[in-house]
Image: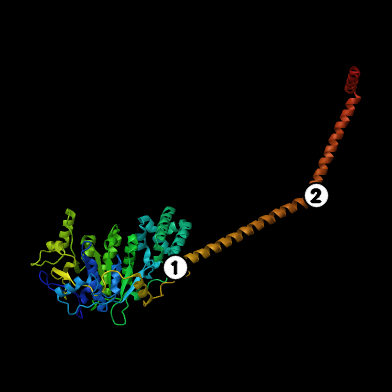
Amino acid sequence: MHQDDRIFVGGGGAGYGTPQHLLLKAANRHGLIAGATGTGKTVTLQILAEGFSAMGVPVLLSDVKGDLSGLAKSGSAEAKLHGPFTERAETIGIADTYAYEAFPAVFWDLYGDQGHPIRTTVTEMGPLLLSRLLELSEAQEGVLNIAFRVADEQGLGLFDLKDLQALLVWVGENRAGLSLRYGNVSVQSIGAIQRRLMVLENQGGAQLFGEPALELSDLLRTAPDGRGQINILAADKLMAAPRLYATFLLWLLSELFETLPEVGNPDKPKLVFFFDEAHLLFEDAPKALVDKVEQVARLIRSKGVGVYFVTQNPDDVPEDVLGQLGNRVQHALRAFTARDRRALRAAAETYRDNPALDIETAIQEVGTGEAVTSLLDRKGIPGMAERTLIRPPCSQLGPITAGERADIIAASPVAGKYETVLDRNSAFEILSKRAAVAAAEAEAAEAKEEEASVAEREYRTARRYSAPKVGRSSSRSRKAKQSESLSQAMANVVIKELKGTTGRRLVRGIIGGLFKGR
C-alpha cells in the first residue's frame, strides 16, 4: 500500500481527484489536519501514524479521546466499523494490499495512570514556559527569572516543585540584596508565584516535574522489525488542565530542537509530532510564546522533526505558524455564521488553485472520511487542492481495553525505567541544610550570649558581696555614729530646757493637769 519513499493518504474514484501521497522527504515540512468535530480528523491522524511507523519513522501523538490506543491492536473484519472500510478500500483501489495490522506502541501519561510516567525538571522547563504555565504577570515573570539566575549562580538544582518553592522562600528572605543587583523583588510577586505553584500542585501538575526525567532517545526508538515506535500520550485527563497540556508539548518541541543535531533535509524524518487540539497552544498566549512556537516550527525541520497540528479550524493557528505548514488535509468546515464563512474563505485561500475544483464549496461538501488535500511535491511545491477519500486504517478504530493496555505497558521496552521517583540532592535539600546550619549557629550564638550575660551577673553579684561590703559597713558605722551623736545632742538640749524656766513651766503644767483630773 505504501511505497518506499511515500505514504499513501487516499485516492479517488468517481468524483475524486488523483491518489494522494505524503512524500517522506517533505514530511518534515510540517502539516495541518483540520475540520469540524466528527468529520474524520482522528482517522486521518491514525492512518498517517500508521504510514510513518511502517516506514521506520517514530511518531509522538497525544490521545485526547482515548481512541488512538487502537493503534496497538490489529483491526478486524468482524468489527462493526471495519466493514465500511473494506468497501472504501475497494473504492480507492487498494483492496489487494489492504490488511489489518497492529503497530508497536508505547503508552505515556503525565499522571502515570495509563502509561509510563513522563517528567521533566523545573530547570529544563525554564522560566518562559513556566511563566506561561502559571499565567504570571510581567513583574512576576521577572522575579521568576531572578530566581533561576540565582539557582544557576549558586549551583542549586531545580528538579521538582519543592526545589522551586524553597528557592523562592530564600529569594524572599534575601530580597533586599537581590533587588539592588537584579531589580525589584517584591514580597507580593513571590507570594503570587507560590500560590500559583500550590494550585498547580493541587491539580496534579507537580507530577510533571521531577526525576528520572524523560530521555528523548526513548521517543526515537524503532521496533525489532524496523517499524517506528508510536508514542501515545494519554491526554484525556490533561484536557482538564489545557495550559499544562500545551506547555508540556511546547517544552517537548523545544527540547527536541535544542537536543537533536542538524540533519538538513533527510530522506525521511527522525520523528513526527502530532499536536491534537492545537488551538490550546495559542489561546491567550503572549506574543513572546507565539514567537517561540513560530521559531521552533521554522527551525526544527532542519533537525528532521515534522510537526502536524490537528485542530478544528485553520484560523486557530496564527498566520505566521500556518505559513510553515506545507502538507494539509482539510476535512469539512461548517459555515453557519458570518465569522464561519470568513474562516472558510480564508482556509480555501491557503490552497493552491485547481481549475477543476471549487475549493470553498468542496470544503463545505466533503463527507466524513473525505477531505480536501494539498501535499508537497518533490520540489517542495504545494500540490493542487484535490478532493480525496481518506484510506481506511489497518489498526483498530477505537480504544483498546484496560487489560490490553496494561499488558502492552508491562511488555514495553521502557517498562520500570520511569516508575520509581528519584529525589536527588537539589535546591530544597541544600537550602534546608543551610537553614539548619544557620539555625544551629544562631542557637549557639544565643547560648554563648546568654552564658556571657550570666557570667556578668555573677561577677557583679560577687563584687557586691565581697570587696564592696567593707565600704558599706564603714558607711553604716559612720551613719550609726552620726545618728548616735544627733540623738545625744537632742537629749542634752531637752535636759537643758527641762532644767530651765521653760522646763519648769512644762512640768508644772503636766502636774497641775494631773491633779485637776483627780
Residue 394 location, x and y as percent? 24, 75
- Mark 2 or mark 1, which is nearer the start of the sequence? 1
In the rendered view, would you say 279 is above or below 490? below
- At mark 1, the secondary structure is loop
| Quadrant of the rendered image containing residue 477 | top right
**Image side of residue 443 versus residue 376, left or right:** right
Residue 40 location, x and y as percent? 21, 66
- Residue found at x 26% / y 68%: 297
Alpha-carbon span between mark 1 and mark 2: 69 Å
Identity, as a three-letter code, of the amino acid under mark 1: Gly
Identity, as a three-letter code, of the amino acid under mark 2: Val
Q: Quadrant of the C terminus?
A: top right
Q: Local crowd at mark 1 within 10 Å, few (<14), some, or many (≥20)?
A: many
> From where the camera sits, is residue 241 visible?
no
State the residue position of label 1: 157
- At mark 2, the secondary structure is helix
State the residue position of label 2: 470
In the rendered view, would you say 451 is above or below 397? above
- Residue found at x 75% / y 54%: 462
